[in-house]
Image: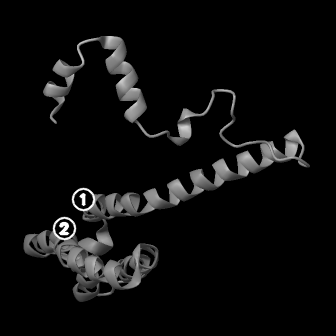
Amino acid sequence: MNMWAWLQAHDSGEIMATSIHAELTPTLDSASEDTPLYPHKSGHGRLAQYMVDVASRSRDIIVSIIACLGAMSMGFSLGYSSPALEDKHLMKMLNTHHRRSWFGSLLTIGAMVGGPVGAVLVSRLGRKTTLILCNVPLAVGWFLIIYATNVVLLYTGRY
């Protein structure tokens, strides 16, 4: 029976509200408002319960910050090429417009390759392990850029 036919069959608002309420399954939040979300355990004082709540929230905050570091590092990497091209040491290696263009573009080419590779790794290793493993090429790339002595190392670190 569709909703419109059901509404026409129950023309009284009170009957309709009672029918709808009776058809709904009870949920966890349908308990009385006096029931605390985290019930107080006997044997523990209020201070101990407060400390547990603070520790739980702190852990959530720390995990959220760590989860955002991936996006921050990508932003740092994307924004790095513009001010880096003003560096005298890099300008000696990236002495042509063509080389500077490649230095700025290689990150996005690496990202196109990294997406499908990441998808395969997530399906085989799981999300957490893949996120941890993604930091290895990121760190190696930054070290290659920092200690580069030629254009090939710069390009490899940027890729």
Residue 147, position in %: x, y? 40, 83
Amino acid type at mark 2: Gly
Badge 2 marks a residue whose secondary structure is: helix
Residue 120, position in %: x, y? 27, 82
Q: Nearer the viewer, residue 89 or 116?
A: 116
Q: Height in image: 134 above or below 31?
A: below
Q: Nearer the viewer, residue 117 or 6?
A: 6
Q: Nearer the viewer, residue 35 or 93?
A: 35
Asked whether disc 2 touches disc 1, contact meaning CB atoms under 8 Å apart, the reply is yes
Amino acid type at mark 1: Ser
In the rendered structure, find residue 9 and report the number of the disc placed on it. none
List the residue tagged with mark 1.
Answer: 82
Check the picture and name the quadrant holding the C terminus. Answer: bottom left
Q: Nearer the viewer, residue 92 or 144?
A: 144
- The mark nearer the N terminus, 2 or 1, is 1
Q: Height in image: 115 above or below 3?
A: below
Q: Height in image: 32 above or below 63?
A: above
Residue 7, position in %: x, y? 20, 21
Residue under the image location 19 percent in, 79 percent down: 113
Check the picture and name the quadrant holding the N terminus. Answer: top left
Residue under the image location 50 percent in, 40 percent down: 27
Crowding near the residue tagged with mark 1, few <14, some 14–19, many ≥20 C-alpha atoms within 10 Å:
few
Q: Height in image: 126 above or below 105?
A: below
Which residue extends farthest front?
9
Residue under the image location 36 percent in, 83 percent down: 144
Badge 1 marks a residue whose secondary structure is: helix
Crowding near the residue tagged with mark 2, few <14, some 14–19, many ≥20 C-alpha atoms within 10 Å:
many
Residue under the image location 32 percent in, 20 percent down: 16
List the residue tagged with mark 2.
Answer: 104
